[in-house]
Amino acid sequence: MKVTKDILYVGVNDREIDLFEGQYTVPNGMSYNSYVILDEKIAVMDTVDARFGEEWMENVRRATGGRSPDYLVVHHMEPDHSANITRFAAAYPDAKIVASQKAFAMMRQFFGTDFAPRGQAVGEGDTLSLGRHTLTFLTAPMVHWPEVIVSYDACDRVLFSADGFGKFGALDAEEDWACEARRYYFGIVGKYGAQVQGLLKKVAGLDISVICPLHGPVLRDNLSYYLSLYDTWSSYTPEAEGVCVAYASIYGNTRRVAEMLVERLKREGCPDVALYDLARCDMAEAVEDAFRLSHLVLASSTYNAGIFPPMHAFITHLTERGFRRRTVGLIENGSWAPMAAKVMRGMLEGCKELCWAEPTVTVLSAPNEKTEADLAKLAAALLKKEQ
């Protein structure tokens, strides 16, 4: 696939994978992206997952037309992108490896080989001339590993963005970009919003016509849309007005209360309502909507004087990713000593810029008329309506 006249795509599609990073369901697979820049000198941009090493090498051989690459540029050392460095180095012994200093240290850790003697360490503002094309490197520490760099080719106005602007899904999957890119972002990069903001500021002054990420499609149309979404996500700004209701229920009564709230919110005109059963849903989807929407309601049964384990896991996912700038409502259930609301609020106390919707709804075993009345008040608070 041609990205530009001189830049070719040589990555692979993975339709065999079930869990990315051992935890994210990827029903439409993954892509591991790699690119070749053809010029007076040839640069290969990153490798792919170990299972696709030979396919990738064949792609590189075809793209280069029998010429030997002069450089392998390593933007990111995560194994799904770096696993074939040793294979490449053996096939092209005269090629230099270009990476950050931290990346060379990681190569020794992963492969037991010191590639620094045949490498070129680059940092902020360093350049690599290939002929017509000159790559300028920008450091992107903790987006989302410490060794990450991105590079910009001014000739074709291409940004090689490492894991930035990536998404779940193989390249032959027909699916909405934003949904799977959002799930990918908040699952994998979400903790590092400040660092992403820093990188966005660095690239703001560049004239970019194409973004080449390490996962997902090459982006070339309406780039302001993708940049705007990344700015929204990394600043923890709600993307849409609405309510995400996430529940953890043992025997179904807490589930019913959550469903009652959702029904009321929809009746009263809430523009966007998402409901998740945390014991059964894709947790990454629930996390995605918790960050996408402006309001979150947590509903949990009391369990061993705490909260039901799926709710504990969900809140941990949120806090680990810097959850903030949202309005949160709480629903608890308990037959003799309701404790869930106190525990949930305590787990979120370190999150910044949260507003609490009142009242907290307490259910004693099963919903009743008082539950209905309290849910009406909570819905009004969430929708900012007079009760």
Image: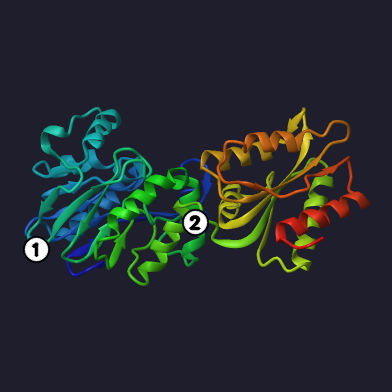
Instruction: Work out whether residue 385 can be spotted.
Output: yes
For the point 51% across and 42% down, the residue is 321
For the point 17% across and 48% down, the residue is 125
What residue did someone put label 2 on?
Answer: 182
Q: Is residue 153 left or right of residue 264?
A: left
- The residue lying furthest to the right in this view is 369
For the point 84% across and 31% down, the residue is 337
In percent of width and height, residue 7 lies at 20, 63
The reply to whether dot 2 and dot 1 touch (C-beta < 8 Å) is: no
Quarter that holds the C terminus: bottom right
Q: Is residue 68 left or right of residue 309?
A: left
What residue did someone put label 1 on?
Answer: 132
Q: Residues within 10 Å of mark 2 (few under 14, many from 20)?
A: many
The local secondary structure at tag 1 comes to loop
Instruction: Work out whether residue 252 can be spotted.
Output: no
Q: Amino acid at mark 2?
A: Arg
Q: Nearer the viewer, residue 324 or 114?
A: 324
Q: Nearer the viewer, residue 380 or 362?
A: 380
Quarter that holds the N terminus: bottom left
First-in-chain label (2 vs 1): 1
Q: Amino acid at mark 1?
A: Arg
